[in-house]
Structures are given as structure tokens and as C-alpha cells.
Image (spheres, helix red, strand yellow):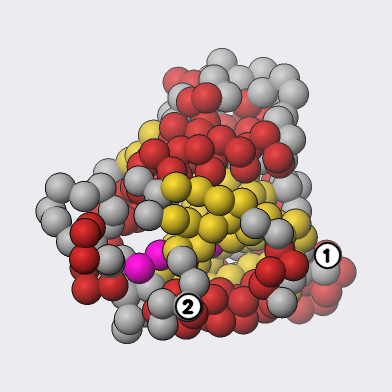
Amino acid sequence: MLCVVHRLGLVAYQEAWDLQNRLAQEVAEGKRPATLLLLEHSHTYTFGRRGLEENLLWDQPELERRGVDVHWVDRGGDVTYHGPGQLVGYPLLPLAPERLPNNTKDTNHPLPTSDYIAYLRKLEQVLIKTLAQFGLVAGQINNLTGVWIQAEVLSRCKNCPPDLYKSPAKIASIGIKVDARGISRHGFALNVNPDMDYWEGINACGLENQNKVSMENLMDLAPSFDEVSDIVVENFAKIFAYKMQTVSSMELT
């Protein structure tokens, strides 16, 4: 099965959200194959369906001073940050069994089905395998969504702030929605080399004092976005059993 990849560069959050909605409709109608959008956002806080306003710590003047937009969206979870230096991926996939071609509706096919938790875990595995190829050991934590670097790894990190040494730190966030037609929206955000100070403006995911870390913190030299994107696409193909085809963003207009 084919999945087309669009690498969009820096995109405002609202523009990307509108694009997701349009493309997901086309996927649902069979007018386009499964699609993966890879991009960066300008500084943005997004609140999911369980979002609480008190988890936004900066007031409006501070948000304006720092150039941060705030959006309430239809994904799961509470609040998270998106910004330059963070690789964001939005997979628009037909997850419901009835949306798959006839020859893939068997229980052995590795594509996700209506078990959306399994789909979320597969996204985590894409990122865990990607980080491993850059020499970074990451994993999952029971009952928490996302990808984490354990404290024993952080304790050997010469570029990490010392306050990260005592507990796991999240390196990638995940929040998804599956619409009524079984098409996935939203997705993952991997911290490559963002300005980590912007996490101070929120209680990320509704949790106080949740540690965050980036690839730049953990490596002597952070890889380029193209390098990370290439490995993400490679692992996405393996885990979701898609043939990936990168196409020009001009085809989205």
C-alpha cells in the first residue's frame, strides 16, 4: 500500500490543521492515498479535548511578547508545545478495517485497525526506532503517552541541564484523533533542536514538573531535519507496512 509524504517546512498551526482536514476528507473519499505530513510549526500551544486552561502558565502579554499562538483542538490529551526545531508528523491513514482495500482486511496485516491504542503505540515505535538509529536509547512508560529518555541515560548526558538527571524526560509527544470515517488526524512531535524555554509556559500534558529533552541536548551535534525526516519515513514504512513516496508540496494546492 502507498503512503505519500509531503515535507512542508515551517507552517502556521491553523494552516496545517485546515490542510489535515481537507486531505483527510480526500483520503476518506478514496481520492488520495494515505498521507504523511512532516513539518515544523511557529511557536504554538495546543490544548486537546482534556485541556484545562489553568495549565497555561503565561499570561496574554507574555504570550504576545514571545510570539506564541494558542489553539484548542480536537485531539486527545491536554496541552503541549509546538515550535521551530521540532519535527511534527501528521499521518492521515485509513484505520478502520472497512476503509482498507479488500486484500488487506486480514488479521495478520500489520496496518492498524480500529484498535486505536495499538495505532498510537506504533507511532511511538516509529520514533523509538528512529532515535535508536542516532544512538539514543528511548522507550515507553506504562500509562503515559509519548517517547521518553530514562533517567539513567540522562545522567550521562553532558549537554543536559542537571535537573533532568533525576527522572525520565519526554523527547516526543503524541496526540491523535480518529474521525467518524476512521481517518487519523494529528500525530507526533519529536524534539530535535527546539528552544526548550517555551515549555516553561505550560504544564505539559497537564502534569507539573514533567521533564523535557531534545536530541540536541543528548548529542554532540544534532542531526539536520532532513536526516531525521529520512529515518522517520524509513521506520514508518517498516512499522506500518507502507511503500513511501515523497512528493512535492506543490501537489497540495
Q: Is residue 92 magenta?
A: yes
**Chief SS of the magenta region:** strand
- The amino acid type found where label 2 is placed reads Lys
Q: CA distance from mark 2 to mark 1?
A: 40 Å
Horizontal arrangement in the rendering, residue 74 relative to residue 249 (left or right): left
Residue occupying image coordinates x 44% and y 75%:
27
In primary-sequence order, the first of circles 2 and 1 is 2
Q: Residue 159: name its quadrant.
A: top right
Question: Quick check: 30 above or below 43?
Answer: below
- Of 179 and 102, which appears nearest the observer? 102
Horizontal arrangement in the rendering, residue 92 relative to residue 67 (left or right): left
Q: Which mark is residue 222?
A: none
User: Residues in magenta?
Assistant: 90-94
Residue 9: where, in percent of width, then height? 75, 57
Question: Quick check: 21 above or below 140?
Answer: below
- The amino acid type found where label 1 is placed reads Arg
Number of marks present in the image shown: 2
Disc 2 + disc 1, Cβ < 8 Å: no
What SS does tag 2 mark? loop
Horizontal arrangement in the rendering, residue 37 relative to residue 40 (left or right): left
What SS does tag 1 mark? helix
Residue found farthest to the left = 107
| Quadrant where the C terminus is found in the figure | bottom right
Residue occupying image coordinates x 47% and y 56%:
3
Q: Which mark is residue 66?
A: 1
Q: Residue 227: name its quadrant.
A: top right
The residue that disc 2 covers is: 31
| Quadrant where the N terminus is found in the figure | bottom left
